Amino acid sequence: MEQAATLAHEKETLTQQYAQASALAQALQAQEHAWQTERATLMNHARSLEDAQRELTLSLSREKQDHALTQARFSAFQQQQEHEATAQRQRDTQQMEKVYLQLQRSLTSLQVLQEHVVDEELTKQQVESATRLRMITSLESSSRQCARQTEEECQRLSSLLGALESTLRHARQEQLDERERLRQEQHRLTALAAHFQAQTSVLHEKSDANAQMLTQYFATSMQDTRMAEARVFQRRQALEDEERKLYDERARFAAYREETLREQQREQTKLQQERERLDTQWQRLRQERDDLDEVIASHEDEFAELQRAHQALQDEKASIALGAEQVAAMAAKCEALTQQLVAREEALKQQQEALNAVRQQAQTKDERLRQDKHKLDERETRLHTQVMSDPSGLSPAMRQLVEENWKKRSWDLGLADAAVHKERMLINCLGLDKPVAPTPSTTASTMPSTSKPWERHHGKTSNSRAQYSATKASNWMPTSSQRTSPPSPSPPSVSSSQPTAPPAPPRAAPLAAPSALRRPSPVVSIEL
C-alpha cells in the first residue's frame, strides 16, 4: 500500500511536471508566433525600403531627363537671341545708310536751289514760277513728313521710303490746285527769295550741325548696343554659373543617396543574418521540445516499471530543470535581440527622415528653378507679343502720353487759324526761325517730346534689348544719350491719371514761339 501511495504520489508529481512542460511549450509557441509576426514586419519593412529605392532611381532618371531638356532649350534660346541680334544690327545699319543718303540728297537739292536763285537773276522772272513750285512742294512734303512722323511714332523706320513716295504722289495731285493760289501770291515771291538768300548760310550751318548730330546719335546708339550686349553676356554667364551649381548639387545628392542605399543594404544583410540565427535557435528549441515529449511518452509507457526507473526519473527531472534554465536563458537572449532590433529600426527611421529632408530640399530647389525658367519664358513671350503689337517698343502709357501732348500742342497753337499753323510748320522745317528759350510753363504745357526718326528707332532697339536683361519687364534702362539730356516735363493733368512712363528720347530744338516767327519788317509778311 505504501508502495502504491508512493507510486500515486510520483504519478501526481509527474502529472504536474507534464502540465508545467505543456504550459512551457504553449509559451514557446506564443513566442514563436510573436517571432513570426516580427519576421513578417521586418520583411514588409524591407519591401518598403526596396520600393523607396526604386522610386528614388526613377526620380533620378526623370531629373536627368529634365536637366537634358533644360540644357537643350537654353542652347536653342541662346542661338535664337544671337541670330536676332545679328539681324537687328544689319537692319539698323541699312536704315542708317538710307537716312544718311536721303539727308545728302536734301542738302544737294538745297544747294542747287541756292545756285539757281543767285546765278540766274536775269532769267528770274521766267523761272520764278517753277522755282517757287519746287520749293513749296518740297516744303509741303517736308512738313507733312514731319507731322506724320510725330503722329505715327510707333511705326518703324523701314516704312519711311513708302511714306515719302505717298507724300510725293499726293503733292503732285495737289499741284494743279496750288497753281491758282500761287499766281495770287506772285508779288510776295521777291520778299521770300530775298529772305531765303539771307538764310542760306543759316541753312548750311544747320545742315552741318544736323550731320554732326546724326554722327553723334549713331555713335551713341552703337555704344548702347554694346552695353546691351555686355549685359546679355553677363546674364548668360550668371545662368551658366547657376546651372553649374545645380549640376554639382545633383551630383552631391546622388553620391549621398548611393551611400545611403549601401548603408541600407548592409543593415538588411545584418538583419538577414540575425533572422537566420534566430531561426536556428528556434529549430533547436523545437527539437528540445520534441525530445521532452518523447521522454514524457516513454515515461507513460514505462509506468509499470516505475520503481526500477525511479532513479532514471530523478535524472530526467534534473535534465528537465536544466532545459528550463536553458529556455529561460534563450528567452532573455531573445528579449535582448528584440531590443536591438527595435533600436536598429529607430536608427533606420531616423536615417529615412534625414533622407526625406534632403529629398525635400532638392525638390524645393528644382521647383524654384522651374519657377525661374517659367518667369523667363513668360517674359520672353511678353516681349515678343509687345514687339509684334507695337514695333516702336513704347509702352501703351507712353504712346498715349505722346498723342495727348501733340493734341494739346495743336490746340495751343490754334488749329482754327490754318494759315498761321502752316506758316509755323513751314518755317520750322526750313530752319528759318531763331529758337527762343521757352518759359517753363509754356514748355511743360505745349511742347511735346520730339525726336528724330533715328533717335526713336535706336532708343526702341536699345529698350527692347535691355528689357531682356532687366529683372522686371516694366523696368526701363535709359541709354547714355538719355542720361545726358534733361527729362522732358509732362503735363500735370496727364501724369495724375496715367501710369508713370519711361523717360522720353532726347528732344530736338523746340519750335519757336508764334511771336518769334514774325520778322520786325512792317512790309514783308509771309502767309501761305
Image: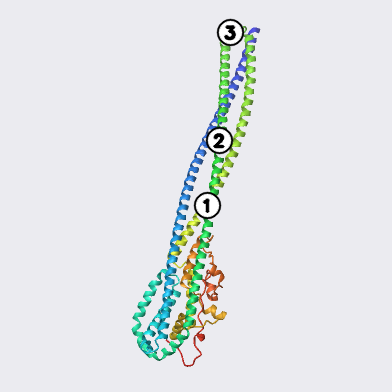
Do callouts 2 and 1 mark residues in contact (Cβ within 8 Å)? no
Above/below status of 128 relative to 504 = below
Q: Which residue is mark 3?
A: 304
Can you tell which quarter of the image residue 388 is in? bottom left
Residue type, mark 2 in image: Arg
Kindly give the residue lying farthest to the bottom in the view shown: 523
Residue type, mark 3 in image: Ala
Do callouts 3 and 2 mark residues in contact (Cβ within 8 Å)? no
Label placed on residue 240: 1
Can you tell which quarter of the image residue 180 is in? bottom left
Mark 1 Cα-neighbour bin, 10 Å: few <14, some 14–19, many ≥20? some
Residue type, mark 1 in image: Glu
Q: Residue at x 54, y 35 (%)?
A: 45
| C-alpha distance separating marks 3 and 2 | 65 Å
Residue 140, given in percent of the width and then of the height, sits at: 41, 81
Q: Residue at x 49, y 45 (%)?
A: 64
Dot 3 or dot 1, earlier in sequence: 1
Above/below status of 266 relative to 290 = below
Dot 3 or dot 2, earlier in sequence: 2
Identify the image quadrant of the C terminus.
bottom left
Tell us which disc is closer to us: 3 or 2.
Answer: 2
Dot 2 or dot 1, earlier in sequence: 1
Residue 386, given in percent of the width and then of the height, sits at: 45, 64
Residue 285, given in percent of the width and then of the height, sits at: 58, 21
Q: Residue at x 59, y 42 (%)?
A: 354
Numbered disc 3: secondary structure: helix
Label placed on residue 262: 2
Do callouts 3 and 1 mark residues in contact (Cβ within 8 Å)? no
Tell us which disc is closer to us: 2 or 1.
Answer: 1
Q: Residue at x 38, y 72 (%)?
A: 162
